[in-house]
Each structure stands twice: as structure tokens, then as C-alpha cells.
Image: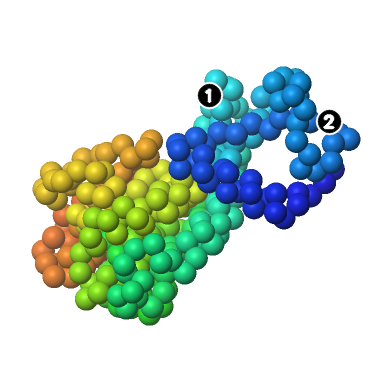
Amino acid sequence: MSSPLDPHLRRALADRVRYYNDLGIYDFYRRETSPDRAPGEPLSDEESTASPPLELGAMTTLSGRAPTGTGTETGGMGGESARRARRPDPAARLRLIREDIGDCTRCRLHKQGRKQIVFGVGNPGADLMFIGEAPGADEDEQGEPFVGRAGLLLNNMIRAMGLGRKDVYIANIIKCRPPGNRTPERDECETCSPFLLRQIEAVEPQVIVALGAVAAKTLLAVNAPMSELRGRWFDFRGTKLRVTYHPAFLLRDPRQKKEAWKDLQTVMKELGLRIPAKQQEL
């Protein structure tokens, strides 16, 4: 049994891993060391340049991705199930991200009336993730995304898919309410989106639904109207992404609910969910 890491060393390692993640490096492999080395003792020059090869089963990746070429895409559990069984605990990863955010003061919004951080809610291992624009007044008050009138409509949309709120994961592009519910500024999105990207990486959904133009344009880094964004699949860092209307927009223009339902049915088909024979009311 390995000795526990010194708390200071553990924090230093976590900081280093996050640093490499920000650089786009996610895979880390365990190196076997001498059993009589004290915890935290540095490697010798000889050990730092050579180490015995590990069996593929001993490899670990902090991102949850299997190392390329290991043959783990096939096996007893098969494909997606095996991958998810191997990945680190998504709930623990989400807790770490929330701790990293802290009582955020990285952009101007902390000085403009926001009450609290609105992080995310739902199933940490969800196959489906909804991403909206920003918290509103109700969300800022309760600390949870989509709990106001738009949230009630989103709940109806999720139920129409045969799912519950607890079955999906819900987050926003930014985590603080803009004053007067204005559209988030570009620099605010750029400051906050790295945390969202880490949330997506932790949950590893099969499908992302971008709710509204702001979410879609920010995630896809495009400037296109909804008419061009809807009705097609996008690849977002290896995850399928679909764009539909934001529930707040549907409250203003209920005529578009049928179009939103078409978008959701396409998502259901991708996830293998049963599409009801009768037209659902959103």
C-alpha cells in the first residue's frame, strides 16, 4: 500500500496538472519508483531518464482517456461503457473545479451586483449536457442554473425527452449574473469559459445542447445566425453538439417551440431514446 502524499505536495501536483491541462496536455502515466524512497523524494538522475515499461493496464490518465494504441476500445465491457468505467470520478473533478473558481473576482461582474457563483447542476456522469448563456435573477438568488421561468420550460423540454433534470447536466457559459440580465461581454465569456470547458471534460457527455445564440457562438467560436446554427451537428472537441433555442426566447416566441422539439428529437435519436408517437407539448 502506497504512503499518502504530503498535503503540500498534493496541492503542488494538482496545480501542475491544471497547468498542463491549460496547455492542452491531459495524459499522464504512472512511473514505478523504488519502494524504499520516501514520499516526495526526487528521482535520481538515472531514474529520471529510464524506468521499466509498465503494462498497459497499469497506465493511468488524469483525463480519463485511454492512451492511444492500448487496444482498450474493445474488450469485455465494450467501447463507451469501458471508457466511462475507467475515467476518474466526475463528481470529484467537478468539486475541484468549483474549488478553483472560489469566490471569483476574475472579471468585472463580481463588482456589478452578482450575489453568488452559479456553477452547474445535475448528473456528473450525464450523457446529455445543456449549456445556456448566463444566470438570471432567480439563478443568482438560488445559486443554481435554470430555476426561473426559463428553467421551468427547460424542465418541460427535458421531461418531453423522457428524462429528468437529475439525468442531465446543466451549466452556463458564464457563472455570474450580468447586470440587468444583459448579454455577456466577450471578455467575460473568455474569462469564464475555461471553467466550463473543464466541466465538459469532467462530465464527458455524449451530446451537448447549446441553448441560444450566445452559448452556440461562444462554444463554436463562430459568428452566425441561429438559422445557420440550427439543424446540423457540430463537432465540439470530439463531442457532438446541437444548437436549439434558449428557453427564454421560447417564452417570448412560443411559436418556435415546435422547432425546438424537432431539435430535441434529433438529440434523442442520437442518444437512442424513444421518441413518443404523439406530439409533445413543451
Q: Is residue 199 left or right of residue 72?
A: left
Identity of the residue furthest to the front in this view: 45
Q: Quadrant of residue 109?
A: bottom left
Q: Is residue 11 left or right of residue 24?
A: right
Q: Amino acid at mark 2?
A: Ser
* Residue 175 horizontal/vertical position (percent): 37, 64
Residue depicted at 43% across the width and 66% down the height: 104
Quadrant for the N terminus, please: top right
Q: What whole-number distance in Å separates the C-alpha atoms at marks 1 and 2?
A: 27 Å
Would residue 212 be seen by someone viewing this image from the given angle? Answer: yes
Q: Position of residue 99 (x, y in %)?
A: 54, 62
Label 1: which residue? 68
Q: Is residue 79 above or below residue 247?
A: above
Which image quarter: residue 259?
A: bottom left
Q: How is the image coloured?
A: rainbow
- Total numbered circles: 2
Q: Which residue is mark 2?
A: 34
Image quadrant containing the C terminus? bottom left
Q: Residue at 57%, 43% (x, y): give it.
A: 17
First along the sequence among labels 1 and 2: 2
Where residue 139 sits in the image (x, y, percent)?
A: 35, 74
Where does residue 180 sit, x and y in percent of width and height?
22, 76
Q: Residues within 10 Å of mark 1 (few under 14, many from 20)?
A: few
